[in-house]
Image (tube, rainbow, N blue to C red):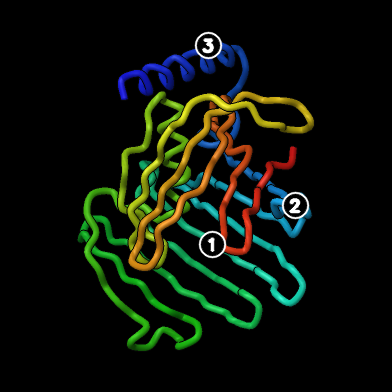
Amino acid sequence: MNHLRQSLFLTACAILAAGAASAQSGFPWTNESLKYNMSWQSGLSVGDATLTAHKGENGWSFEATVNAGIPGFAVNDRIRSSATQSLCSTSLDRDFSHASKKTREKTTFDQKAGSAERTTLLPDGGTKPGRSTFDISGCARDALTFLYYARAEMGQGRMAPPAKVYFGSAYNVRMDYTGAQDILVDKKMTTTDHMVVTVKGPKSDFHFEVFFARDPARTPLQVKVPLSMGAFTLDLVR
């Protein structure tokens, strides 16, 4: 662990020193918009995804979209979250469309009261039993906010500690740094920091890989997600 912290710290120092003469851009300094191409392990492109961050007076607004499909099955997902300046969640909206199945729900976080309310808007319109309240502790974060929090921590030479992350249900999330790894980005080999993210929830236990750029914003360059039907990859489009 000490070696990991030292490695990340030295990397962060080198990045900051190299970029001191230029203006910092991207999260967490400015608004950000990232677009990804989604492909199966065969290399076939099946859609795209976006990540956006907008900084306001009271905090941050984040959004992620996924638009993909294979014959007979289309996926159109939109996730929006808002957070304070210190990246504590205030709300999470999930709008999913998987083939003919559509779901929509909203979670509102009351950090001071230590509670959150989850409301299902579709298909039951938010009436009982589609509404529930649960306890939260500390600075609770939804999954989208946690991604940006983890990037901010990496930019400071730190790893985000294991945490309970909310995405409908509560999930235990852990990020493990495996070291530097070269990947192909825009037809050029690029050195990245490789992370394995482990997610455990009430009915799930899986992991995926994220390759972060060694820039001040710690931009996610590539994400690999294994599924039962095969693995797919998200590649940042420059």
Which three-letter amino acid code belongs to the residue tagged 2? Ser
Which three-letter amino acid code belongs to the residue tagged 1? Ile
Q: Quadrant of residue 3?
A: top left
In the image, residue 196 lies at what x, y percent?
A: 47, 41
In the image, residue 56 lies at what x, y percent?
A: 49, 47
Which three-letter amino acid code belongs to the residue tagged 3? Ala
* Residue named by callout 1: 79
In the image, residue 175 lies at what x, y percent?
A: 40, 40
* Residue named by callout 2: 42
Q: What residue do we see at 38% from left, 23% from top?
A: 4
Q: Quadrant of residue 44?
A: bottom right
- Mark 1 element type: strand
* Residue named by callout 3: 17
| Quarter of the C terminus within the rendering | top right
The tag earlier along the polypeptide, 1 or 3, is 3
Q: Describe residue 96's horizontal placement relative to residue 88 as left or right.
A: right
